[in-house]
Image (cartoon, rainbow, N blue to C red):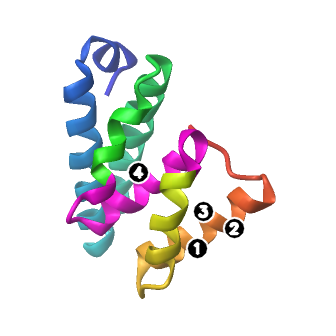
Amino acid sequence: MSARKFQKASIEELVQWYAESSVVYEQSLNAADSRSANRAADKISGTYRELRSRGAESQLLPLLKSENETVRTHVAAHALEFAPELGEPVLLWIAKRPGFNGIAAHYALKAWREGTLEFP
């Protein structure tokens, strides 16, 4: 997706794309489809960058209550940059769970605490 398309999108569209791409990312990983997973990850990153450039990254915070654990994991990890008091507890809970999200949450927290977590 082009940077221009992100720039033209409304904040509501960006939040929707972020959530949808997180679900696609999860489905792609489960299907061992790395190309689709990488495209979804790129869309998540692009969406986050655009929201941040508008000062609207907090619009993702309602997704911390998403039924989808992968959506919550992505939002919580990004929230470490702008609302760590909201992202950290979610990641702590997810890190205790089995599977990919638990591993991702564990390493996001580890990198954040070490000061090496980089945001797109």
The residue that label 2 is drawn on is 110
Residue 29, quarter of picture: bottom left
Residue lying at 28% horizontally and 74% vertically, measured from the top left: 30
The residue that label 3 is drawn on is 108
Q: From mark 1 to mark 4, how far is it between C-alphas?
A: 14 Å
Residue 48, quarter of picture: top left
Q: What stretch is highlighted in magenta?
A: 64-84
Residue lying at 20% horizontally and 27% vertically, measured from the top left: 12
Q: From mark 3 to mark 4, how far is it between C-alphas?
A: 11 Å
Q: From mark 1 to mark 3, how far is it between C-alphas?
A: 6 Å
Say whether disc 1 or disc 4 marks the residue closer to the N-terminus.
Answer: 4
Tag 4, which secondary structure?
A: helix
Q: Would residue 95 be found to the left or right of residue 69 on screen? A: right
Residue 50: tell me if it is visible.
yes
Residue lying at 24% horizontally and 18% vertically, measured from the top left: 9
Up the image or down, 6 lies above or below 71; here it is: above
Instruction: Name the kind of residue labelled 4 in the image.
Output: Val
Residue 33: tell me if it is visible.
no
Q: Do the residues labelled 1 and 2 touch (CB within 8 Å)?
A: yes
Say whether disc 3 or disc 4 marks the residue closer to the N-terminus.
Answer: 4
Say whether disc 4 or disc 2 marks the residue closer to the N-terminus.
Answer: 4
Instruction: Name the kind of residue labelled 3 in the image.
Output: Ala
The residue that label 4 is drawn on is 75
Q: Residues within 10 Å of mark 4 (few under 14, many from 20)?
A: many
Q: From mark 2 to mark 3, how far is it between C-alphas?
A: 5 Å
Does the magenta segment cover residue 118?
A: no
The residue that label 1 is drawn on is 106
